[in-house]
Image: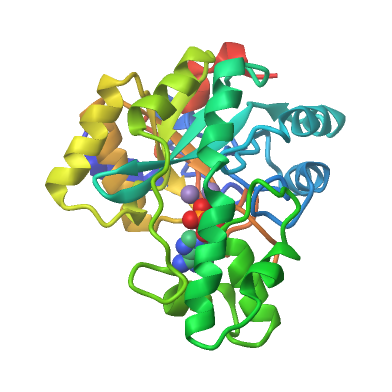
Amino acid sequence: MSSYNILPSLSSPTGNLPASVSQSQARGILNADLHCHSIVSDGTMTPEALAERAKAEGVELWALTDHDEIGGQHRAMAAAKANGMRYLTGTEISVTFAGETVHIVGLGFDPDDAALTLGLKQTRGGRSQRAMEMAEGLAKVGIQGAFEGALKFVSNPELISRTHFARFLVESGVCKETHEVFRKYLTEGKPGYVPHRWASLRDAVHWITEAKGMAVIAHPARYKFTANEEYALFSEFKAHGGLGVEVVTGSHSALEYVRYAATAQEFGLAASRGSDFHCPVESHTNLGGLPFLPGALTPVWELLADRIQ
Ligand code: AMP
Ligand code: MN
Ligand code: MN
Ligand code: MN
């Protein structure tokens, strides 16, 4: 099947489906939202409030995927159950690959796995030091008190992230919105940017897989890779045992859905769908608010059927 045949199934979950939805297209038709963040990392809502919001937005299968943290998993699982929603355990691991930060989502793992818990704890380890260096960089351009300011927005002391700095710079009137903060202060070459060495791709994929979960490349269109580097990412990821890629995400355009649907097929990876929702006012994609997965792909939830709670 050519990648163009997937276009008819890119309809909205609430919109009308084409009359001729084929069997293969129907496979992707589930309002699964397998990527979002709570106060356990850099989201602004509790796992419980997210579960209620997801349910209200029509999500049928949900995963909370906090950055480098699984501390919210039991709460999210219970909240999904209380709302009559199916659930997959989740996390989003920060990885350094070819000099870039890449995110690897883990789904359907044992939330009490000791090696995964330890690996994530190590991955979180350098964040406080990095945050102090970020604040020093910002102080040099006249923005004082950014470390303490960002901390006011942090709920998990081990998880201070650029997002918390962005919220502080908006609150203090330096920028109008968080995207502007990232553009002007928090990305490579800007005063508050501090390079950081995260987990290796191999370790992240192994932690997830050995905890009986599935590793998924998050929002591949976001990385600034050459074609060769991207090829290396996908092939090394597969060689380590990775099985999925996000195709429909809040970070992709419609054209990128098509592009990464083709990549999923090329590499024989299952496809995932997730909003990457963080906050009602900052996130441009709501929970459950994305188009369905293109039909010709194997949805990650088919391979994780026995891991769904
Ligand atoms: P960190 O893990 O501290 O490097 O922070 C990464 C987080 O920053 C991501 O997970 C996003 O939530 C957020 N982020 C990255 N780039 C942007 C951007 N351009 N606009 C808004 N948020 C961003
Ligand atoms: Mn984030
Ligand atoms: Mn991410
Ligand atoms: Mn995310």
Viewport quadrant of the C terminus: top right
Question: Residue 65 location in percent, x, y?
Answer: 60, 39
User: How is the structure coloured here?
Assistant: rainbow
Reply above or below: 147 against 290.
below
Count every numbered label the image shows and give the total: 0
> From where the camera sits, is residue 144 visible?
yes
Residue nearest the viewer, comparing 77 with 196: 196
Reply above or below: 60 against 240.
below
Question: Residue 56 location in percent, x, y?
Answer: 78, 48
The residue at 81%/29% (across/down) is 84
Left of 245 or right of it: where is 113? Answer: right
Left of 42 or right of it: where is 249? Answer: left
User: For residue 234, what is the image quadrant?
Assistant: top left
Residue that protrudes farthest toward the right in the picture: 82
Residue nearest the viewer, comparing 290 with 36: 36
Question: Residue 209 location in percent, x, y?
Answer: 46, 17
Residue nearest the viewer, comparing 180 with 275: 180
The residue at 55%/51% (across/down) is 127
Question: Residue 173 location in percent, x, y?
Answer: 65, 87
Residue nearest the viewer, comparing 24 with 164: 164
Residue that protrudes farthest toward the left in the picture: 228
